[in-house]
Image: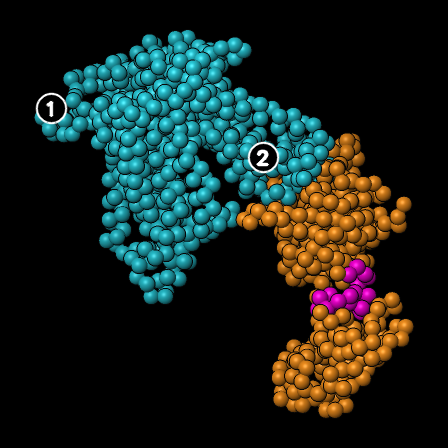
Amino acid sequence: MNWLKQTRRLINEPLLLAMIVFVWALLIVFIVYPILMVGIKSFEPKTGVYSFDVYRALFSKKYFITPIINTLKLGIVVASISVLIGYIFAYSIAKVNVPFKTFFRTVATFPIISPPFVIALAAILLFGRNGIVTRNFFGGVPPFEIYGFLGLVIVETLAYFPTAFMTLEAILISISSDLEEASLSLGSSKWRTFWRVTFPLSMPGILSAWLLVFSQSMADFGTPLILGGRYHVLSVSAYLEITGSYRISYGSGLAILLLIPTLIAFFVQRYWLSRKSYVTVTGKPSVIKVLEPNVYVKVMFTAICATLVFAVFLFYGTVLFGSFTKLWGVNHKLTLENYKFAFTYNWKYIKDTLLLASIATPLCGILGIMIAYLVGRKQFPARRLMEAFSLLTFAVPGTVVGIGYLLAFNQKPLLLTGTALIIILVFVFRELPVGVQNGVAALYQIDRSIEEASLDLGSSSNKTFWKITLPLLMPAFFNALFTAFVRSMTAISAVIFVVSGRWNLITVRILGAVGNSDLSQAAALSYVLIGIVLLAMFFLRFVTINFSYQTKIRRAMS
Amino acid sequence: MTEYYVEVRNLVKDFKDSSSGSFIRAVNNVSFGVKKGQLMTLLGPSGCGKTTTLRLIGGFEIATSGDVLIDGTVVNDQPPNKRPTAMVFQSYALFPHMNVYENVAYGLKNRKLSTQEIKKRVSEMLSIVGLSGLEKRYPSQLSGGQQQRVALARALVVQPKVLLLDEPLSNLDAKLREQMRIELKKIQSNLGITSIYVTHDQLEAMTLSDVIIVMKDGVVMQQDSPEMVYRYPANKFVAGFIGKANFLEASVVGIEQNRCKLKLISGADMVVGIREGTRFTIQEKVYLVLRPEAARFVKPNQGIVNGMVITRIYTGANAFFEVKTDYGILSVEIQNPTHMDLPEYGETVGLVYDTATLSVVKYE
């Protein structure tokens, strides 16, 4: 009876026990309970009446079936293209030794840290009815319908290929070039070496990247809301059911249909694929040797990367340009009006977003690190379950979380609707996995015996955490804070259900501006957001440099 | 009350194998005791359960069953920070964000001593391990040997009742290891601290220990002083693990109190000393344990066995031979070979062994 022994040991450490109980309480109330509410509501078409009516309707009416098929189709196409592009990009950087590597890598991460609908906005500014490409090259007739499937594919691919790229780059780097050299020395050509050695070894990474992008595309809300047109997807349909038609149980049902494939993708990726991986993580990166390819190959890969980077620049540049123009497509005279407007009329949105995200971020970081520490270092019953629940909101689409919070916290004793607190809670628990994952990864790198040494020398596990673990976790902690902050600032899919007249957010305001065809204002607000994110990044660098122990050591050396 | 300062009783530890879900018994009903001030070594090949046993004593693992007693108190339910033990880790586990002084002072600060007292004790300890003057350095700025000394100082400075050492020298290069081995022994016996030492290096165990416990597959094979472990190995595994050994099949033909008479397959009879209390029966099949370093060459038919030299290696201080006999290949190690006539490759020789070095173990 292992759990009995573990429990007995816990009683000797009351603080640890209290922490575990506290974390469990939070996870149940703010993660499990809201999601459960969505599930329950989907079986309750009328208050107090429970039946399968909702699902019967969802699977019989064309009105509901179309978004289900659309969402899956979009997810599959976007994931496949993104993985292909991401692989080429990652291969170029990790294995081909293209020039400007750092530059390419930096540009590729733009879409990850910027608001998700900036690219959608750019697509409209370029290819929409008043787009500059449409006007200047196609005489005012859009070259293709940007509002619909094709537009969504282009925009989501640009937005999500970086995810695929980052996953695949890590995998490709971890494939030792010794293996490739061994294959070459045994007489295989480079082409054969790629298909027989490199590609099979990167297969788990490819599947993993595919599933990640698939889930992101499924869960995307901002892009299809702006660009979907008549192409309906689940996240938008669920939102419209609830806020437009007030059919909450139907919205919940759609949300559950959205939840199931993303959950499956998440668990397959996390618990099955991660075990399939051929590469062993040693903690220390091995020396990366890059095989020098011939000139033509190198030029080809460089050209592909450059094209992609050009596309990213084009999209971001267009929005930047748009934020300084008077009226897009009509009057392209440069002006600061839009920013003036943003900082006066829309100042409240900026201020609220900053305030709420700033409150949520440290809470999220601390809770995340605390959970990471518990599951990564402590023995207690249901430890793995705690980890799974804390990572759950990674897998759960924002729409589901948003509806869950709407349903769960609109009555006493937890009446939070319309308050700032509910937005903060959404931020904290939505970004919780960031902290947990960063923390677990960092803990993995810290030799366990360092903490054992501290315990052994008489420090309680609480003191060990504060004196030893936390200082060593600091870099990861700051990183988690930064990511959580950026993601909170740019979040939309979940919070859109809990904003109110009293407390509203920039992202919601941007969507509103796009809806009113006030594209210049949307562009300006987007760049205000990007500016805040960049400031946060510099702040993070400053903090990391000044408060990490590595700097302390470096100073002591000089 | 027992005579032992640290005692382990019927300790069992099962680990769940994550791939198959079944349990693996890492430590199987282990019992032993260490007297106050002694250094005891847990010796065995990797995977024998020695480190797990040490971690159970330190409180880092929770035993499946069994008890750990320190100074007469059962400490099973105490977490590591409540146990009067201090451990020197294989990886040293120095706190990378603290300098040498802070590392060594860390445990003292938990004991609520005055700053002055802490300062005094730290500088005393640093001078014992020979690190005075390096207080302000960080672990990453120290050599492997210096890191090792910090780890030792950090554990010793809290004056634990028991010092636990988990292969502390395995990360050092050969020369430094030899030097630290001797130094460690000096420090340990000067301070008179009860210690439990884990290693897979039999030479290290022989050098340092008052008592050696040989383990295999989670089970204690033998528990004795270094001399006794070498002289009277408890079984074939111990005989082979401690020093080098060749085994010759034989059968018992006569038993006296501490001697027994063997008949070798060659037909030769010989009398071999056995440990008092060891039980063999007449006609029992046994192994005669031959130590290569106790062998001497004689003319053919004058020894207990004849054979042909098939390997001959001369290293200066030693000479190694392999002799092919009817009963298998026997190794021979001659020390100070310059004083002797060494047989040539291919030569037929006879072998004799110094009877005092022979021992008998059960056939398995």
Secondary structure found at label 1: loop
Q: Are marks 1 and 2 in contact (CB under 8 Å)?
A: no
- The colour scheme used to paint the residues is by chain
Of the image marks 1 and 2, the number of the one nearer the N terminus: 1
Q: Secondary structure at mark 2?
A: helix
Q: x, y percentage for residue A87?
A: 32, 44
From the viewer's perspective, is residue B274 above or below residue B160?
A: below
**Which residue is disc 2 drawn over?**
A383
Q: Residue A316 or B3: which is nearer the viewer? A: B3
Q: For this view, does A136 lie left or right of residue B33?
A: left
Residue at the disc numbered 1:
A140
Chain letter of mark 1 equals A
Query: Taking the image as drawn, is residue A419 in sight?
Result: yes
Q: Dot 1: within a 10 Å radius of its alpha carbon, few (fewer than 14), some, or many (20 or more) residues? A: some
Q: Which residues are magenta?
A: B222-240
- Tell me if residue A488 is in the magenta stretch: no
**Which chain is indicated by disc 2?**
A
Give the residue drawn at x 71%, y 52%.
Answer: B28
Q: Which tint was used for chain A?
A: cyan
Chain identifier for the orange-coloured part of the image: B
